[in-house]
Amino acid sequence: MLAVQFAWNDACVDHGCSEGTFPEIFTATLESAAFIEKNKNKLIQFALSMIPPDCKTATDVNTVVEAMKSGMSWQ
């Protein structure tokens, strides 16, 4: 996916090709896929598939998804 490649290149300049690159890849993937997919859960899962499953971003996103599934609010 082109958005992933551009996000990786940009993040490496800004964040040094480390853990900080994964939030940018996640966000770029989610935003670009939102042009064709409207289901938020599918969007999140697709964006998660573009980053390592054990990175901090994936862990945090999965924590929020599980909290939402259990009925917790963002607060």
Image (cartoon, rainbow, N blue to C red):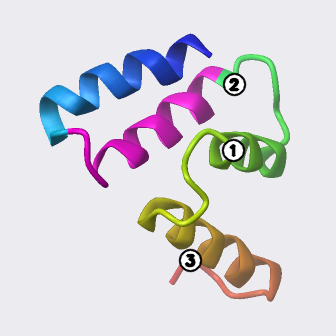
Q: In terms of depth relative to the viewer, which is nearer, 20 or 42?
A: 20
Question: Nearer the observer, disc 3 or disc 2?
Answer: 2
Residue 28 part of the magenta segment: yes
Provide the residue span drawn in magenta: 17-32
Callout 1 amino acid: Ser
Image point (54%, 66%), residue name: 54
Q: Which residue lies under the disc numbered 2?
A: 33
Callout 2 amino acid: Ala
Q: Crowdedness of circle 2 by 10 Å Cα count: few (<14), some, many (20+)? A: some
Q: Which residue lies under the disc numbered 1?
A: 49
Q: Which image quarter: residue 29?
A: top right
Q: Earlier in the sequence, mark 1 or mark 3?
A: 1
Taken as a whole, is the magenta stretch helix, strand or loop?
Answer: helix
Q: Give the spatial CA distance, label 1 vs label 2.
A: 12 Å
Residue 16 part of the magenta segment: no
**Mark 1 and 3 residues: CB-CB less than 8 Å, in contact?**
no
| Residue 42 percent across, percent down from the top left | 83, 44
Image point (69%, 24%), residue name: 33
Image point (33%, 42%), residue name: 21
| Residue 50 percent across, percent down from the top left | 61, 39
Q: Crowdedness of circle 3 by 10 Å Cα count: few (<14), some, many (20+)? A: few
